[in-house]
Amino acid sequence: MSENVSRVQRDSKVPVVNLPNALTVLRLLLVPVFIILGLQQSWPALWASFVVFAIAAITDRFDGKLARSWGQITDFGRIADPIADKALTLCGFGLLSYQGFLPWWLTILIAMRELGITAMRAFFLRRGVVVSANQAGKLKTFMQMVALGTLLIPWAHFVAMNEANEGWVVMLIRLGQIFAGIALALTLYSGVMYVIDGARLMRASSADEAGAEAVRESASEDAAEESSKRGVAGQHVQS
């Protein structure tokens, strides 16, 4: 089983209420604030939207690291952390497409991959298996955050202050769009890796179930045979 795939820790003694999980929940709560501010037309609101996004992105950097270093890894954190990441990044990409910085097809492709993997995680969770982020998934999340952070800065404000700034502002926006293209490639690649891990896990689960069924059938046959022997022995005693 891959290192990012494990059984549900039903007997875990780590408390769910801890700082890493609190940071994850905070990131979820910041998402609507970030979107509401980003939809405003004033420069202060747009700058505030970027600051909120940056704070949420920083919590993503620290919650997992704190959980590992403090030994506070929980199933809630392993499940909620990717969900918080997806909520933040998908809303960010949607906002940038709405503002015209990114094409909608890019956002739709990323959303399809993210929602598909979330559905796969839910499928395995119902079977007692937790699928957390793999290395490719962590890299794509980092690249998505870099692309979003670059493009969510209200660069047009610098042009509004001085039109001479337009040249370098356009260059930085193009750079952010390149980052978004790289993030898309990593997003699709990591999605394929998750599917491969999922298929491997399905085969392993099928093999385990087949083995368990064989053991049950063997035990049932042994019990029937033992019962038959006892019945024969009883007949000999009576005779």
Image: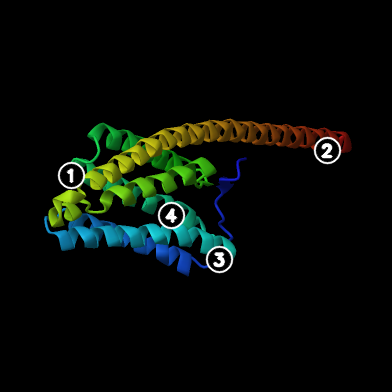
In whole angstroms, how far apart are the C-alphas of marks 4 and 1?
Answer: 27 Å
Which quarter shows the C terminus?
top right
**Going from the N terminus, do you reach mark 1 or mark 2 first?**
1
The residue that label 1 is drawn on is 99
Q: Earlier in the sequence, mark 3 or mark 2?
A: 3
* Residue type at tag 4: Asp
Is disc 4 surrounded by few (<14), some (14 to 19) or many (20+) residues within 10 Å?
many
Is residue 17 shown to the viewer in this render?
Answer: no
Q: Marks 1 and 3, Cα distance to the nearest angstrom?
A: 43 Å
Residue under the image location 27 percent in, 58 percent down = 50
Q: Position of residue 68 (x, y in %)?
A: 57, 60
Is residue 76 left or right of 13 when viewed as pictured?
A: left
Q: Quadrant of the N terminus?
A: top right
Residue with the mark numbered 2: 234
Check residue 81 in the rendering and tell me which mark sits there, or answer none: 4
The amino acid type of the residue labelled 2 equals Gly
Tag in front: 3 or 2: 3
Point out the frontmost of discs 4 and 1: 1
Residue in the picture at 42% in, 57% down: 60
Q: Position of residue 46 (x, y in %)?
A: 19, 57
Q: In the image shown, does 147 or 170 lie closer to the viewer?
A: 170
